[in-house]
Image: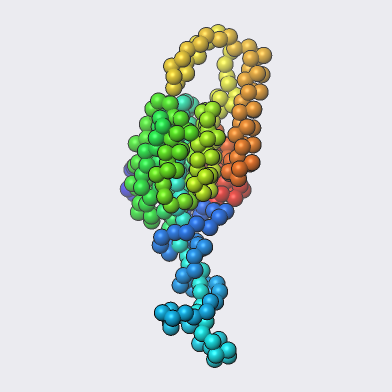
Amino acid sequence: MEQLTQTTEDLLTPDFLRKIERLSLVAKRLFPGRLRGERRSTKRGASVEFADYRNYTVGDDFRRVDWNVYARLEKLFLKLFVEEEDLHVYILVDASESMSFGSPSKLLHAKRIAAALSYIALSNLDRVGLAALTGTSAATLSPKRGKPSAFGIFEWLKSIEPFGTTRLAESLRDFSLRTSRPGVVIVASDFFDPDYQKGLAALLSRKFEVTALHVLDQDEVEPPLVGDLLMIDSETDERREITITQTLLRKYDQRLAEFCGGLESYCNRYGVNYVRTTNQSPFEDLILGYLRRRGMVK
């Protein structure tokens, strides 16, 4: 743990890692895996938990014949067992310039959540892959397995820097087309892209189980602004002079509520998990409390 102290101090502390290493991510669906892990797959294999019988056919392994049944029925039946296999978990972090806003930044908050969920999955023998969404593409880190992989994942997350404009429709479609094995996908983003629905739809069409982790800055939720200001778009550099009044703030609150409500409504309609957080939310409460209550971890 000493090495983790030196390299992940701005993401997770060793004390927090100890608190979460016995947790596990919850998948609502079963996904076929590659290696035997901690989760039940839809396949029938040779684990210790009985699942069903089937008739013997020529060439089957006699070691799997249930001889007790043969003694009673004088027919050959093979015992089938539930095969325990690993889940693939993909955590996609929006690395657009708008995610640099706030203190701590929305991006840092998203990276800390990604680090925590990655460590939980690795501790449970799941495979963890990551991607940084920039522009129209997804820069990926190939899936890793086992807690020793946490060091490399944390370092990769720390290297992500905000850049440019992320177009979620294109970057999520790029990820979905380049990822052949389905699993759980968690998208950490502020979703400030009018085409975000197309991006989420691309993941759903490829049979991923999707969670939209909506990350906002507290000042975006409750702007501490008043008077004459020059507003600069962090992604497009567009500039606009405006006068902040109470009437304008009420209109902003209404538009924000419509935006968040629209995203949540879309998620509910298409079976996407929706979780909203701000960069000022107590981080440990989010992972150990809120996500547990939402059924994402247990």
Question: Residue at coordinates 64% horizontally, 36% vertically from top-left?
Answer: 265
Instruction: State the image coordinates of residue 202 (x, y, percent, origin top left).
Output: 50, 40
Question: Residue at coordinates 49% horizontally, 65% vertically from top-left?
Answer: 43
Residue 152 seen: yes
Whether residue 164 is situated above or below residue 132 in the rendered picture: above
Q: Quadrant of the C terminus?
A: bottom right
Question: Residue at coordinates 58% horizontally, 89% vertically from top-left?
Answer: 73
Residue 285 seen: no
Pick the residue in front: 117 or 49. 49
Left or right placement of residue 255 versus residue 144 in this view? right
Pick the residue in front: 66 or 161. 66
Instruction: State the image coordinates of residue 35 (x, y, percent, origin top left).
Output: 40, 62
Question: Residue at coordinates 55% horizontally, 51% vertically from top-left?
Answer: 297
Instruction: State the image coordinates of residue 258 (x, y, percent, origin top left).
Output: 64, 27
Whether residue 60 is situated above or below residue 85 in the rendered picture: below
Instruction: State the image coordinates of residue 269 (x, y, percent, origin top left).
Output: 64, 41
Quarter of the rendering containing residue 254: top right
Quarter of the rendering containing residue 137: top left
Pick the residue in front: 13 or 148. 148
